[in-house]
Amino acid sequence: MSTVLLTDTQTSITIILAIFLGVFLLWNSSSCNIPYFNPPRFWQLGKAKRDFITNGMEMIWAAKKRFPGQPFRIMCDRGEVVVLPPHMAHEIRNESSLSFSKAMQMDFFTHLPGFKPIDHIAHKGEVLQHLARRPLTKYLNRVTKPLASETTFAVNLIFGNLPVWKETLILDSSLDLVARLSTQIFLGDKLCRNEEWLRVAKEYTMDMFEGSRILSEVPGPLRYPYALFSPHLKALRSKVNRANQILQPVIEERRAFKEQERKAGRPVPVFNDALEWAEAECRNIEYDAAGLQLNLANAAIHTSSDLLAKTLLLLSNEPALIDPLREEIVRALQEYGWSKTALHYMKLLDSALKEAQRLLPTDWLVMRRIATKDIHLKKENIKIRKGQYVMVDYTTTMDSAVFKNPEKFDIYRWVRMREDPVLAHKAPLVSTSELQLGFGHGMHACPGRFFAANELKIALSYLLLNYDWEVTSGTSMKPWMFGSMPLVDPSTTLRYRRRKAEINLDTLQCET
């Protein structure tokens, strides 16, 4: 077969597929009565997605103005999405026909090589969800000591001990710190300081997001061959392979040791980490242990490092806010030591984290779902068709009718709410409600948020007591917008200087 004939055939197939896709999208769009803000022609899909990446928030505000208080459809970087108004978050929170796992599978192309670890979100035994809801949350009191101990090592390694002003790329530093702390709990002492694993876990998280962004602009029929030959996605697959090479010997060694002890009639050892928890929570359904750990690392590292960096950035911009936080941290630790109870009483720190999440969330569109069947939302008389992608508008956090001075970083905002008997239950960082959707809401709310809250409080206790912080001259506080996501600009630098802490954090009594 000649090269010309082969090329002509490939071109014809591509054109036919494009026409078919266009006809399907036009039919799909016309059969839905939810208004469409920016319906593209089928040949403009790529441009429409790129436009949203560049001007996503402007488009969302314009759509809200055109369709006030109503659901609307918008073409964004994920494709066509039904955006529900904030007040509907509570109505759909426990709708079983709106699938979070299918939305994740679609967003991160889990059918393609390199993205398979993310597919654990749809594991039949729900191993990832059960691991986060049960052992990770159940053993919060047991992980405080190892987290505090590892924080000492990690903070000294990343930031040093010199009492002179230095600069740091705060997103990179936060990513490094959270990766080390999370790995301590997920994989234990043997791997939490394995620099190769830490590199793979951090880079996989970043490369996976970039890879999914690239693929979102590639026509569906071409994604598989593109994924096979793209240098970026080849690198992603190599990280999955490297993760297996690092973890598999550890897993096999552990299983062999358990079998040896069992045969010898001795008690089978139990390891208190995510490798062990996954074995117990998989319900005897096969899973990829290394892939699960990459997924777990991705979930923990991305959201927690994002919130840590944003909180430090906002506090560094107003250093006067740091002293009252230090005073609270010292009081709690002096009375309760390193314990779950001490972290519970860090209510101002809790409020500061929740306020940073309100002001600079991970995304202004939240609660991603895909309908697994046609749904009729009776209260609003809205029909969502099977296969439609649904999200909730989260811009209510910037609504002056809901929050007083919404653009102000007010670390006391949620402390004051605790004093209101009607709203007090909505005030803690880990509480979800229509007021605060940073961790989602309802049956698919982030199951690891309790661990994340404690991890971040421990990290900030060390960072605020041991260092002074300020924004580097010329640093912009404006987030780097990617579609509907306000991100910390990777070039953002903060200045820090070692200070003498009010108490020695390393000699405190620890809960065991």
Image (tube, grey):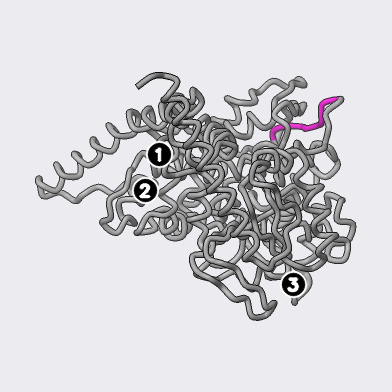
> Closer to the N terminus: mark 1 or mark 2?
1
Left or right of 94? Residue 58 is: right
Secondary element at tag 1 = loop
Front disc: 1 or 3: 3
- Give how far apart the Cα atoms at labels 1 and 2 are: 8 Å
Q: Nearer the viewer, residue 365 or 429?
A: 365
Question: Residue at point 62% right, 49% down?
Answer: 79
Amino acid found under the numbered disc labelled 1: Gly
Question: Residue 18 or 406: which is nearer the viewer?
Answer: 18
Where disc 2 sits, the SS reads loop
Would residue 396 be counted in the magenta stretch? no
Crowding at mark 2 (Cα within 10 Å: few <14, some 14-19, many 20+)? some
Q: Which residues are magenta?
A: 466-473
Residue 301: give x, y in percent of width and height: 55, 40
x then y, percent, for residue 4: 45, 20
Q: Is residue 7 left or right of residue 148?
A: left
**Numbered mark located on residue 423 in the image:** 3
- Say whether marks 1 and 2 touch (CB < 8 Å): yes
**Residue 217 percent across, percent down from the top left:** 60, 37
Residue drawn at the location 41% of the way across and 26% of the way down? 238
Which mark sits nearer the N-terminus, 1 or 3? 1
- The answer to whether mark 1 and mark 3 are in CB contact below 8 A is no
Q: Quadrant of residue 505?
A: top right
Q: Amino acid at mark 2?
A: Asn
Residue 285 vs residue 371, the one in the foreground? 371
